């Protein structure tokens, strides 16, 4: 593993800097708007705009990279993201912030695509799993570091936007000065929504709910913690601890996923999420003089909720791969990310509206409602196994959440058939005859 980290240190450093800036920006916006008494609906809209930009960037990024090349596209989008962050610090106008937040999401998706295509180009086939794992660790590490900046610098003045812009600027250096050759151009994978809705409906439901929950968490958890009486430093610790839970759970989750029925695991995870989130949903406001007590209560509870909520997306990805052939898994990854992005756009808006009307505890009431949807919709006994692939259960691979990757991350996933990756690298699509496609689309 050390050799992998050394070989890809420049790209991993770029990913860490990108996610440090992104994680810090999300929390900063929630705290800044909360301090100015802006209601939760606007704060949710800021996170929804970011995910909208990510979804749009997945389509636009391919065209931009094909037109100007990987390095120029990466640097140009980095400049856009940095300028947008500085614009947020300079112009306190919420309508303009929404536009800038969307631009940040769009630019970052293009940057993710460049990093991931480069990782795929340089990784040997037998190393793809380790390279992917290193990228996941870099992503979570950056998100955690972004929260810990608030512990060191709790002020919400103009220094924070400048620090965020600094992180995005530093992420440009390792890619801009690389001496590696450009990766081969990649073509957007077809989504095939009708096929996947029939083939893996329970997986898509799980991914959609995961997007609802995780989008609401990143957008509104800092506001929730602030309204529960935590200081800025404590909010940084709360958010950092919750995100760290997402990284911590991935390895034991992989062990369980490879040994037990994944539909059962998803349903059990939904039950646990309901049980862990319910106390926070019912917990009244705590106007206590000792500000350390809310952190003592909220951090373990929030840690447990995140320990479960960050399992939903990787489990859904593994479950869907069990029922989709290798040459369709690039398209499957694109479909899953778009579905996640749609949920992540809706989640912050819905939870923000509830928090505006009924108070901050509605964030975790929303999580409870999402858990009930999963408990209702995911029914292991209805999985027929008709289209279960020969190698199922396909090996579980820890997968980054919160859209910190692009559809090109499929090329690094060792579950994806090498032929599908080669076809996408050449810009050709795998074609299936109409009768064959109709036969394959019967539900699992």
Image (tube, rainbow, N blue to C red):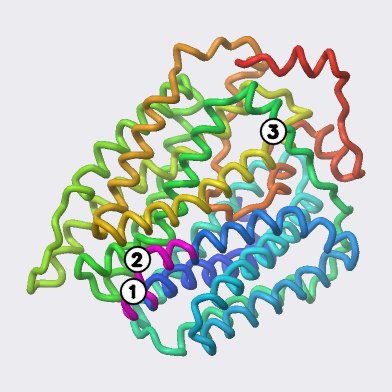
Circle 1 residue? 34
Q: Residue at the spot x=61%, y=23% of the render?
A: 322
Is the residue 279 above or below the residue 323 in the image? below
Q: Residues within 10 Å of mark 3 (few under 14, many from 20)?
A: some
Quadrant where the C terminus is found in the figure: top right
User: Residue 283 in the image: x percent, y percent?
Assistant: 16, 52
Of marks 2 and 3, which one's residue comes earlier in the chain? Answer: 3
**Contact flag, marks 2 and 3 (Cβ < 8 Å):** no
Q: Residue pushed farthest left?
A: 289
**Helix, strand or loop status at disc 3:** helix
Q: CA distance from mark 1 to mark 3?
A: 38 Å
**Contact flag, marks 1 and 2 (Cβ < 8 Å):** yes
User: Residue 79 in the image: x percent, y percent?
Assistant: 71, 79
Predominant SS of the magenta segment: helix
Specify the segment rendered in magenta. Answer: 33-45
Magenta includes 417? Answer: no
**Helix, strand or loop status at disc 1:** helix
Q: Residues within 10 Å of mark 1 (few under 14, many from 20)?
A: many
Q: Residues within 10 Å of mark 2 (few under 14, many from 20)?
A: many
Question: Which of label 1 and label 2 is nearer to you?
Answer: 1
Of marks 1 and 3, which one's residue comes earlier in the chain? Answer: 1
Q: Choose between 355 and 248: the one closer to the eye.
A: 355
In this view of the protein, can residue 238 be seen by the observer? yes
Circle 3 residue? 193
Of marks 1 and 2, which one's residue comes earlier in the chain? Answer: 1
User: Residue 51 in the image: x percent, y percent?
Assistant: 57, 57
Is the residue 262 above or below the residue 174 in the image? above
């Amino acid at each position: 593993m050390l050799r992998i980290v050394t070989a890809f240190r420049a790209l991993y450093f770029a990913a860490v800097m990108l996610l440090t800036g992104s994680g810090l920006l999300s929390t900063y916006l929630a705290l800044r708007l909360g301090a100015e008494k802006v209601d939760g609906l606007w704060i949710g809209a800021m996170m929804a705009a970011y995910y909208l930009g990510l979804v749009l960037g997945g389509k636009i990024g391919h065209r931009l990279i094909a037109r100007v090349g990987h390095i120029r596209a990466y640097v140009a989008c980095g400049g856009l993201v940095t300028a947008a962050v500085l614009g947020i610090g300079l112009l306190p106008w919420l309508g303009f912030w929404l536009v800038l937040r969307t631009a940040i999401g769009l630019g970052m998706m293009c940057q993710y695509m460049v990093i991931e295509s480069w990782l795929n180009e340089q990784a040997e086939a037998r190393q793809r799993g380790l390279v992917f794992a290193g990228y996941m660790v870099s992503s979570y590490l950056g998100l955690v570091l972004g929260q810990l900046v608030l512990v060191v610098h709790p002020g919400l003045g103009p220094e924070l936007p400048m620090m965020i812009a600094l992180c995005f600027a530093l992420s440009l250096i390792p890619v801009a000065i690389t001496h590696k050759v450009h990766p081969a151009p990649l073509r957007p994978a077809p989504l095939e929504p009708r096929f996947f809705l029939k083939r893996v409906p329970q997986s898509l439901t799980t991914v959609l709910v995961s997007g609802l929950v995780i989008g609401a968490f990143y957008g509104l958890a800092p506001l929730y913690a602030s309204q529960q009486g935590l200081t800025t430093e404590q909010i940084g610790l709360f958010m950092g601890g919750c995100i760290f839970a997402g990284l911590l759970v991935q390895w034991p989750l992989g062990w369980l996923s490879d040994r037990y029925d994944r539909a059962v695991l998803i349903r059990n995870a939904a039950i646990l999420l309901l049980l862990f989130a319910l106390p926070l949903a019912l917990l009244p406001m705590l106007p206590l003089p000792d500000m350390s007590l809310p952190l003592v209560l909220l951090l373990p509870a929030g840690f447990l909720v995140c320990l479960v909520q960050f399992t939903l997306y990787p489990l859904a990805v593994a479950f869907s791969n069990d029922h989709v052939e290798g040459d369709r898994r690039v398209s499957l990854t694109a479909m899953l990310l778009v579905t996640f992005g749609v949920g992540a756009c809706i989640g912050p808006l819905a939870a923000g509206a509830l928090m505006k009307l009924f108070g901050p505890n509605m964030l975790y009431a929303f999580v409870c409602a999402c858990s009930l949807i999963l408990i209702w919709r995911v029914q292991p006994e209805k999985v027929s196994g008709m289209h279960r692939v020969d190698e199922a259960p396909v090996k579980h691979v820890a997968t980054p959440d919160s859209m910190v990757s692009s559809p090109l991350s499929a090329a690094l996933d060792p579950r994806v058939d090498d032929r599908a990756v080669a076809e996408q690298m050449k810009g050709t699509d795998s074609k299936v005859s109409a009768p064959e496609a109709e036969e394959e689309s019967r539900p699992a």
